[in-house]
Amino acid sequence: MPVDVDAADLELRRWIRSGDMVVWGQSCAEPQTLTEALVSQRAELGSLLGFPGIPATRTVRPEHGDHLSLLSYCGTGSNRELIRAGMLDVLPCHYSALPALLGQGRHRADVVLVQVAPEDDRGRFSMAAANEYLGAAIDSARVVIAEVNDQAPVTYGDRRLQSKDIDVVVRTSRPLAQMPVRPTSEIAQRIAATVAEQIPDGATLQFGIGAIPEAILGALRGHRHLGIHSGLLNDAAVDLIEAGVVTNRRKSADPGVSIAGVLMGSRRVLDFAHRNPRVELRGTAYTHDHAVLAAQRRFTAINSAIEVDLTGQVNTEVADGTYVGAVGGGTDFLRGAARSADGLPLVALPATAGGRSRIVRELNGPVSTARSDAGVIVTEFGVADLRGVPLRERAERMIAIAHPDHRTALAESEQRNEVLA
């Protein structure tokens, strides 16, 4: 049976050792009472490595780097200032690799801090706002400390915790962390309208993080019988479900149910998922599995990018020399959509940023997605379908969707290129 500890009396040094790898839930799933205790007690705990994922709070700040180092798969949100401070390093891996890495790999979790809803009449704890890679980390961790928050949603899925899975229980009552809904720009709306024309009724959607995917979801109000199988569930997706656009009836797998790994948005998405059997949170080994994705007919992957080159290589990680994104699940979902019957692997981005073209001759950052995985690229100026297209024609199609002010320079740079690269 787990030890029941009052939050005011929580002494983490009883369970956490110097040198431990500590994993906790990301975004809305951050167990804030536990992470706040971790940073306030860090001097007593020795040298620790933490894995925060995408933070929705600023619980961990640069000044905490005196005893705490961080590892994450992304530079999103407040992770950027932690990277600049030299406190956080980035693990550039596919999202599908995280369960193995945190469960049994080099970065195996020693301690997991998890937020759960209060136990039901059978003693089971709902995973609340996230399942994804937490389950694998919990299975291998030496210690699991659970913040049992009576304001956390009760959600369904393929994993619930029992008393035997938990070593320490800390009971709290506090609002969950939230991620704000992003404002939609005119350019994002234009891109979204173009993407919406590509998506058929009955498609099963995956969507990434950011203003562009959210705008695209907002442009799908006229569609019918869409489904959701995604890494996350956000406010824009809830809008489509409540409008009757998403019914999940035509999904090849999990019909009638929206599948996600984590809730990532405002209180609205948390309240919507609470005791809602039409929403299930699954582990990353399921949400990002290529075979599962390919089995969905008309699986449509909707992701954004920092820049795309003329051959279809995609950079989703670095902008102006700063790590701001992630490898993430983009390639996992693009590959799944490419294998799906009538699937659609989409990458959407504005044609420019700060006056500079985001359609480029050569990437200014890493190749996050190889050109061999390129699918359909969309800007506010049109659509470039690169599937099965050779290099010279790819360049022509990509230049056609660049901003008109940059097309001549891109064409000239391509003409000077004597070697297909």
Image (cartoon, rainbow, N blue to C red):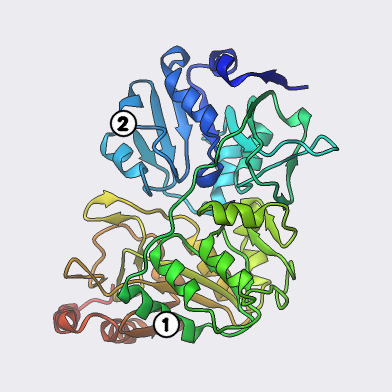
Q: Quadrant of residue 55?
A: top left
> Which residue lies at the image location 69% right of the left edge and 73% below the top edge?
248
Q: Are there few (<14), some (14-19), or many (20+) residues within 10 Å of tag 1?
A: some
List x then y, in percent, for residue 119: 76, 36
Q: Distance between the residues labelled 1 and 2?
A: 40 Å
Instruction: Determine whether label 1 and label 2 are within 8 Å by CB.
Output: no
* Three-letter residue code for mark 1: Ala
Could you tell me which secondary element the residue under label 1 belongs to?
A: helix
The nearer-to-camera label among 1 and 2 is 1
List x then y, in percent, for residue 318: 30, 55
Q: Which of 291 and 116 is in front in this view?
A: 116
* Three-letter residue code for mark 2: Pro
Q: Can you see residue 307?
A: yes
> Which residue lies at the image location 40% right of the left edge and 32% below the top edge?
60
Q: Quadrant of residue 212?
A: bottom left
List x then y, in percent, for residue 338: 55, 75
From the viewer's perspective, is residue 252 above or below residue 73? below
Q: Which mark is residue 193?
A: 1
Could you tell me which secondary element the residue under label 2 belongs to?
A: helix
Q: Is residue 181 left or right of residue 337?
A: left
> Which residue lies at the image location 61% right of the left edge and 49% below the top edge?
132
Whichever of callouts 1 and 2 sits on the residue coming sooner in the sequence is: 2
Q: Residue 12 carries which label?
A: none
State which quarter of the image contains the N terminus: top right
From the viewer's perspective, is residue 63 above or below residue 379? above
From the viewer's perspective, is residue 155 above or below residue 244? above
List x then y, in percent, for residue 43: 41, 15
Q: Nearer the viewer, residue 127 or 294?
A: 127
Residue with the mark numbered 2:
62
State which quarter of the image contains the C terminus: bottom left
Q: Are there few (<14), some (14-19), or many (20+) residues within 10 Å of tag 2?
A: some
Q: Which of 316 and 39 is in front in this view?
A: 39
